[in-house]
Amino acid sequence: MAKKVKFQPYGQWLLLPNPAKKVTDSGIILDDKTASSIVTNVLTIVAKGPECKFTDVGDTVMVDPTVEARVLHLDEGEFILVAEYQLLGKF
């Protein structure tokens, strides 16, 4: 289930959890090498802009791994913003 956030993207932007985490959900702090080895490009959409046509909140999607996403630090955690066209597909 997707985490509920207050932030609402505009246009065709999607809000996704940041896959490059330095701390696990249980609180374990990871070194840079370990953190980079567990990065994934399969993520769940947390919020979407009103012009997104092919995806919905809660969809599991694959992001193009060559994309440079914008990182957002929100109260609910750290997220990335990508445009819908930067997705390779959804599951």
Image: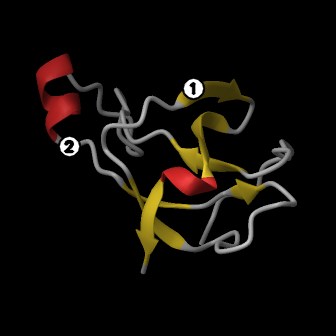
Q: Is residue 78 left or right of residue 20?
A: right
Q: Within the image, what quadrant is residue 42 found in?
A: bottom left
Q: Say which amino acid is labelled 2.
A: Ile
Could you tell me which quadrant the C terminus lies in? bottom left
Could you tell me which quadrant the N terminus lies in? bottom right
**Which of the colour schemes (rainbow, by chain, secondary structure, one colour) is used?**
secondary structure
Please give the name of the residue rendered at 42% of the width and 45% of the height, measured from the top-left corner. 25
Residue 69, x across and y down, in percent: 51, 32
Depicted 30 relative to depicted 4: above or below:
above
Depicted 50 relative to depicted 37: above or below:
below
Q: Which residue is mark 1?
A: 71
> Is there a contact, CB below 8 Å, between mark 2 and mark 1?
no
Q: Nearer the viewer, residue 79 or 12?
A: 12
* Sequence-earlier tag: 2 or 1: 2
Numbered disc in front, either 2 or 1 = 1
Please give the name of the residue rendered at 43% of the width and 71% of the height, measured from the top-left corner. 89
As measured in the structure, the alpha-carbon distance from the residue carrying label 2 to the one carrying label 1 is 18 Å
Depicted 79 relative to depicted 6: above or below:
above
* Residue most extreme to the bottom: 91
Q: Which residue is mark 2?
A: 38
Q: Is residue 12 left or right of residue 83?
A: right
Residue 37, x across and y down, in percent: 14, 37
Q: Which secondary structure lies at badge 1?
A: strand
Please give the name of the residue rendered at 63% of the width and 65% of the height, measured from the top-left corner. 2
Q: Nearer the viewer, residue 25 or 55?
A: 55
Residue 57, x across and y down, in percent: 69, 69
Q: Is residue 58 left or right of residue 7?
A: left
Residue 53, x across and y down, in percent: 73, 72
Question: 10 Å neighbourhood of mark 2: few (<14), some, or many (≥20)?
Answer: few
Q: How many marks?
A: 2
Q: Say which amino acid is labelled 1.
A: Val
Please give the name of the residue rendered at 20% of the width and 18% of the height, measured from the top-left corner. 32
